[in-house]
Amino acid sequence: MPDIKVQDRRLQEMVISQAHSLLAHHGAWKILTYLQDHVWWKTMVKDILTYCESCTTCQQSKSSNQQPYGLLNSLTVPSYPWEAIGINFVGLLPLSKNRDDEYNLVTVVIAAQLNHIYCTQDC
């Protein structure tokens, strides 16, 4: 296929765009397989991959190729204090209507002991 421009667009781009719309965003390899039956040009694979990577619909609807997550494993019980420390950070909480507008709390759990550390906006 010759590399010509039609109204400031490359002919290859127009063909890819039509095939992309016709195949309903099914990905680069489906478009490549479809177009190879009808047309060919030197940078066809690269052009199709570039076009599909720039399509926001394809990127949002792309299925994950990762394996499913495994089961959660419980943590072992610590055998001595400070063996394991866990911290959860929670960002700014809404202002309380009945607690003097202070609603932040830090909870510290050490083995079987539970400690609360209250903090304000200055923390």
Image: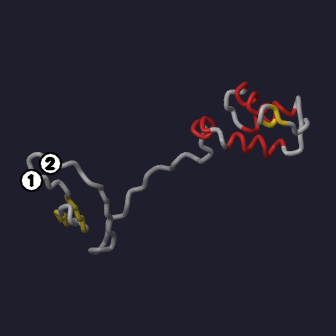
- Which numbered marker is on residue 100? 1
Work out whether residue 78 or residue 19 is closer to the camera in this orientation and state it.
19
Q: In 3D space, how far apart are the residues under numbered discs 2 and 1 (Cα atoms)?
A: 7 Å
For label 1, the SS is loop
Q: Is residue 55 visible?
A: yes
Q: Which quarter of the image is occupied by the C terminus?
A: bottom left
> At 42% from the left edge and 55% from the top edge, which residue is drawn?
73
Residue 72 falls left or right of residue 49:
left
Q: Position of residue 65 (x, y in %)?
A: 62, 45
Q: Position of residue 38 (x, y in %)?
A: 88, 29
Location of the N terminus (image quadrant): top right
- Element assignment for label 2: loop
Crowding around mark 2 (Cα neighbors within 10 Å: few <14, some 14 to 19, many 20+) is: few
Quarter of image, res 89? bottom left
Numbered-mark total: 2
Location of residue 53 (image quadrant):
top right
Q: Is residue 82 above or below residue 44?
A: below
Q: Position of residue 115 (x, y in %)?
A: 18, 65
Residue 96: assigned label: 2
* Kind of residue at disc 2: Ser
Which residue is at a point 29% across and 74% down the rendered structure image?
Answer: 82
Q: Amino acid at mark 1?
A: Asp
